[in-house]
Amino acid sequence: MSGRAGHTAPMRRLAGFAVLLSLLAPAAAAQQTNTGLEALGRRDQVLGWEAVGRVDMNNAGFCTGTLIAPDLVLTAAHCLFDQAKGAPYDPASIQFRAGLRDTKIIAASRVRRAVAHPGYTPFAAVSTDSIRHDVALLELAEAIPAGRAAPFAIAAPGSSKTVSVVSYARDREATLSWQRACHIGDHFAEIMSFDCDVNHGSSGAPVFDLSDGRAKIIAVISSGSRDGGKAISYGMELPRMVADLKAALRSGKGVILAKGDAPVAQIRRIGVSDAGKSSSGARFVKARTTTP
C-alpha cells in the first residue's frame, strides 16, 4: 500500500500494530462483499469526482488529494516529506492535477503553501498517534473554480459501515479509480480501519460516506498492509483535524512556504509495499514510474 512521498516506501513497523489489528480487523472480515474498482477513464465517468486529483511531489512520487475549497487540497501529511532527504518538499515542486485521466486533466495548479497537522511527527515510526494526525492541507497558487471541480465537504462518520473510495495507485497511476462499496472495519480513538482496495499512491485518498445521497469525506487513507490480495488500511476522523489545519494556515504556524513566495499573515478562508503475510504498516505513496 502506499505511503511515503517521493519514493517507493518500504513497509514500516507500526507500533502496537498487533493490538490495532485485534481491535479493528475482525469487524472488517465480517462485512459484505466489496465492489471492484471502476476505472474512470472517460470524461463522463469523472463527472462528480473532478475534485479528486493526483498530488505529484517533485517529479518523484505521488499521492491522492481532494479539493475541500477552491484553493485547498486535503491529503495525507506524510506526502509532504521526502523520506530520502529527511526534509519537507518545497511546495513549489508539488502540483495538484484535478481529475487526471491519462494525459487529460480538469485543472492543475502548483502548491503555494502546505501544512501538516500540528500533531503529526515527520519521519517517526508509524503508530496509532501518527495515523490519527496524518492529515495535511495544500494551498494552491491558483484556485480551481468550483464550476470546474466542486469541492467536497468534510463530515464525521455516520451510522453506515459502507464507504466509497476514489484514488490513484500502483498500475493505475494515470487513471482515477472508484470503488463504489467497501467497508469500515471498526472505529475507535478517532481511527478507522477499511477493507478498501488501495495501494501505493492511495495515501491521502478520500473515503466517502454516500449514505444520504451526497458524497462527504469522512477520512483519508493513511497507512496499511496487504496479506495476499487483501488489504487493510487506516484513516482518521477529520472535522477536528481539518479545523486545526485551517487555524494553522491562518496563523502561519508550521506552514511550509514555497520558495520565492512571501509569507502571508492571514488568508480569507481557507502511496503499498508487497508485504506478503506481514504485520507491519505501510504508507501509500507511489514512486513515479511514468509521466502521464
Image (tube, helix red, strand yellow):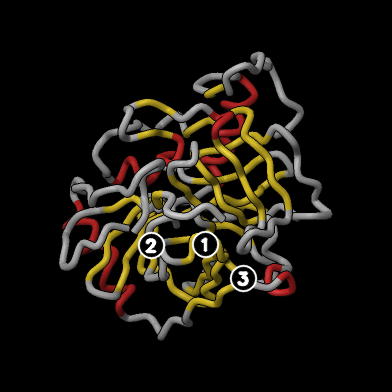
Residue 113, horizontal then vertical, whole percent: 60, 28
Quadrant of the drawing holding the C terminus: bottom right
**Point 46% across, 35% down: residue:** 80
Q: Amino acid at mark 2?
A: Asn
Amino acid at circle 3: Leu
In this orientation, which residue lies closer to the viewer: 15 or 277? 277
Is residue 133 visible to us here? no
Q: CA distance from mark 1 to mark 2?
A: 9 Å
Figure disc tally: 3
Q: Which mark is residue 199?
A: 2
Taking the image as shown, residue 125 lies to the left or right of residue 258, namely: left
First of labels 3, 2 by sequence position:
2
- In front of the other: 286 or 132: 286
Cα gap from disc 1 to disc 3, whole angstroms: 16 Å
Q: Which residue is mark 1?
A: 167
The x and y percentages for residue 91 are: 55, 30
Residue located 68% across and 17% down the image? 264
Find residue 49 and report its image quarter: bottom right
